[in-house]
């Protein structure tokens, strides 16, 4: 196994997580200070989702033409330019376009990075090494809000930190090998539907986690502010959710190498449902802090286990296309989640965000009770 390449790809994706973690909450806070409501902020949060769908469609085609490593480097630099323009052009309509561009660019990075990692790892270490990817990515997003709390939300330094990270990351990929090959084919909607029919539980879980992540970085800070917490406490709560996502991924990944991955998957779905329902009840108590940890860990566990299950089934172009479908589902979740939570928070209930997550997790639990939720039986 190419360990140096594994850690180089890991570090490059980690830089993306940190860049997003420091810039996405800053966008939401800036819009809040400009007087925009929850729905307008939700629309902004959903814009990258459209970009995700576009990026997933062209990723395989571009990777075949340019090569996986070259395309990843170009996208990292393009992402740096897009985030820099957020600081230079403070306008809601312009930011909508820039967030769309960021969605396209970073989607391609994630598709190729996750495919590269799943291609590199050996089967007996797959659970732990894929979980390490999920853990470090979550930690990078955790560091983003914490760093933003130090830098402050009344200036543009957070944007420029994201730019610096994405400018430097491509240098880590110079000379790296072992990336999956790809064919010059677009990923169509009919392909996605076939993927969802074959692996419905994974499709639902990825969409649910995408909605979770989009809402946590953009709407959770606003939700906490609307519940009466200060900006510092709101950022700390966001970070605590990501701590749960990060810290428990390695234990989940380690267990996935020794016990049934499907049983772990079902357990994460149940815990996510129960923790989401408990948030409004425990929000004003000290118990909210360990609850945030469980909330983040269970959602992150679903995504990590989905990647592990994808990696054990596919290789090369099939692996790239499977991850492109994961990205398409991610885009759907990112699009629907913030819009639904933003509209619900503004016009229905102030607790729409956790209740929406509870409903999504309940739907997944029901799906897991059906035979064939993971497609044809395969050894885990």
Image (cartoon, rainbow, N blue to C red):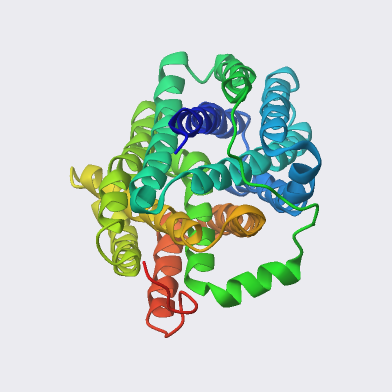
Q: Can the viewer see residue 159 in this picture? A: yes
**Relative to residue 168, is residue 316 depicted above or below?**
below
Q: Farthest residue toward the bottom?
A: 371
Q: Farthest residue toward the front?
A: 1
Q: Residue at x 45, y 67 (%)?
A: 360
Q: Farthest residue toward the left?
A: 286
Where, quadrant-wise, is the C terminus in this rendering?
Answer: bottom left
The reply, left or right, for residue 176 in relation to residue 186 is left
How far from the left and from the top, in percent, is residue 227?
A: 38, 44
Considering depth in this image, is 109 or 160 the residue closer to the camera? Answer: 109
Q: Residue at x 50, y 77 (%)?
A: 375
Where, quadrant-wise, is the N terminus in this rendering?
Answer: top left
The reply, left or right, for residue 97 in relation to residue 19 is right
Q: Residue at x 45, y 30 (%)?
A: 7
Q: Residue at x 38, y 71 (%)?
A: 379
**Relative to residue 342, is residue 100 depicted above or below?**
above
Location of residue 20 by image quarter:
top right
How far from the left and from the top, in percent, is residue 214?
A: 53, 47
How far from the left and from the top, in percent, is residue 162?
A: 58, 22
**Relative to residue 8, is residue 171 depicted above or below?**
above
Considering depth in this image, is 359 or 263 the residue closer to the camera? Answer: 263
Considering depth in this image, is 268 or 343 the residue closer to the camera? Answer: 268
**Relative to residue 75, is residue 292 depicted above or below?**
below
């Amino acid at each position: 196994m190419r360990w140096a390449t594994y850690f180089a790809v890991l570090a490059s994706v980690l830089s993306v997580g940190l860049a997003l973690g420091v810039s996405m909450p800053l966008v939401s806070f800036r819009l809040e200070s400009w007087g925009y409501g929850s729905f307008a902020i939700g629309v902004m949060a959903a814009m990258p989702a459209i970009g995700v769908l576009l990026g997933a469609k062209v990723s395989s085609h571009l990777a075949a033409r340019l090569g996986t490593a070259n395309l990843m480097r170009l996208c990292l630099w393009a992402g740096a330019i897009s985030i820099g323009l957020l600081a230079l052009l403070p306008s809601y309509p312009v930011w909508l376009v820039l967030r769309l561009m960021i969605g396209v660019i970073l989607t391609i990075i994630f598709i190729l990075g996750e495919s590269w990692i799943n291609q590199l790892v050996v089967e007996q270490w797959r659970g732990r090494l894929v979980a390490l990817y999920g853990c470090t990515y979550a930690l990078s997003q955790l560091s983003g809000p914490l760093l933003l709390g130090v830098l402050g939300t009344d200036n543009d330094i957070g944007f420029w930190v994201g730019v610096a990270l994405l400018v430097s990351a491509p240098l880590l990929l110079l000379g790296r090998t072992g990336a999956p090959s790809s064919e010059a084919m677009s990923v169509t909607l009919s392909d996605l539907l076939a993927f969802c029919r074959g692996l419905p539980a994974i499709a639902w879980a990825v969409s649910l986690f995408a909605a979770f992540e989009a809402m946590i970085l953009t709407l959770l800070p606003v939700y906490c502010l609307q519940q009466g917490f200060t900006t510092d406490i709101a950022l700390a709560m966001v970070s605590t959710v990501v701590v749960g996502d990060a810290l428990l991924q390695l234990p989940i990944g380690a267990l996935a190498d020794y016990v049934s991955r499907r049983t772990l998957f079902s357990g994460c779905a149940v815990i996510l449902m129960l923790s989401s329902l408990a948030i409004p009840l425990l929000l004003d108590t000290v118990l909210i802090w360990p609850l945030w940890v469980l909330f983040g860990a269970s959602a992150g566990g679903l995504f990590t286990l989905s990647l592990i299950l994808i990696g054990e089934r596919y290789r090369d172009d099939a692996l790239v296309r499977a991850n492109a479908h994961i990205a398409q589902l991610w885009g759907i979740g990112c699009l629907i989640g913030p819009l639904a939570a933003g509209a619900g928070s503004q016009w229905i209930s102030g607790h729409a965000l956790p209740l929406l997550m509870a409903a999504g997790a309940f739907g997944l639990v029901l799906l897991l009770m059906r035979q064939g939720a993971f497609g044809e039986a395969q050894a885990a």
